[in-house]
Image (cartoon, rainbow, N blue to C red):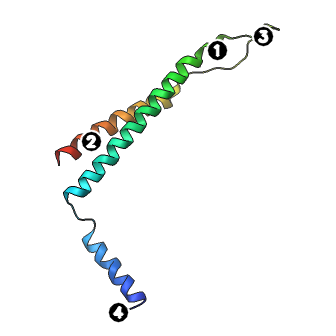
């Protein structure tokens, strides 16, 4: 078969078969989960340090006019969501390694 019919049959075959469950696919998914956990850990820790080091600006004033800068730095809820995402993704690695 050539042309359009061949692509349709390939698509139907892949639809029925899907991705084969073997050790390689579980290994690849484990590697991606571990890499995602590492990147989330790095981003959450950098964000936490950045917020902690810049919170002093909340109390700074202009040295000349003694007027507050009106810049407010706070943790907010997104930082906690980032840490929660890291914890949950790190915990999701456990089922991958068991399989």
Q: Quadrant of residue 56?
A: top right
Residue 55 in the image, given as x and y percentages of width and height: 58, 16
Toward the bottom, the furthest residue is: 1
Q: Earlier in the sequence, mark 1 or mark 3?
A: 1
Sooner in the amino-acid sequence: mark 3 or mark 4: 4
Image coords of residue 6 (percent x, y)? 36, 86
* Residue 80: image location, x then y, percent: 44, 28
Residue found 41% across the figure and 30% down from its top? 83
In the depicted structure, whether residue 34 falls above or below residue 60? below
Q: Earlier in the sequence, mark 2 or mark 4?
A: 4
Which of label 4 and label 1 is nearer to you? 4
Place residue 59 in its image quadrant.
Answer: top right
Residue to which mark 3 is pinned:
67
Asked if marks 3 and 4 touch (Cβ < 8 Å), the reply is no
Q: Are marks 4 and 1 in contact (CB under 8 Å)?
A: no
- In this rendering, the answer to whether 12 lies above or below 41 is below
Q: Is residue 2 left or right of residue 25?
A: right
Which of label 3 and label 2 is nearer to you?
A: 2
Task: Name the residue carrying label 2.
Answer: 93
Which residue is disc 4 drawn over?
A: 1
Query: Element type at marker 2?
Result: helix
- Which quadrant of the figure contains the N terminus? bottom left
Judged from this view, the residue extending furthest toward the right is: 65
**Callout 1 touching callout 3 (CB < 8 Å):** no
Label 1: how many Cα within 10 Å (few below 14, some 14–19, many 20+): some
Q: Which mark is residue 58?
A: 1
């Amino acid at each position: 078969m050539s042309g359009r019919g061949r692509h349709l049959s390939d698509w139907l075959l892949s639809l029925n078969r899907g991705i084969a469950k073997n050790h390689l696919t579980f290994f690849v998914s484990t590697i991606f989960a571990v890499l995602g956990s590492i990147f989330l850990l790095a981003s959450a820790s950098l964000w936490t340090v950045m917020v902690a080091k810049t919170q002093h600006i909340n109390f700074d004033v202009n040295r000349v006019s003694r007027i507050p800068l009106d810049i407010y730095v706070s943790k907010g809820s997104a930082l906690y969501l980032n840490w929660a995402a890291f914890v949950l993704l790190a915990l999701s690695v456990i089922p991958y390694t068991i399989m």
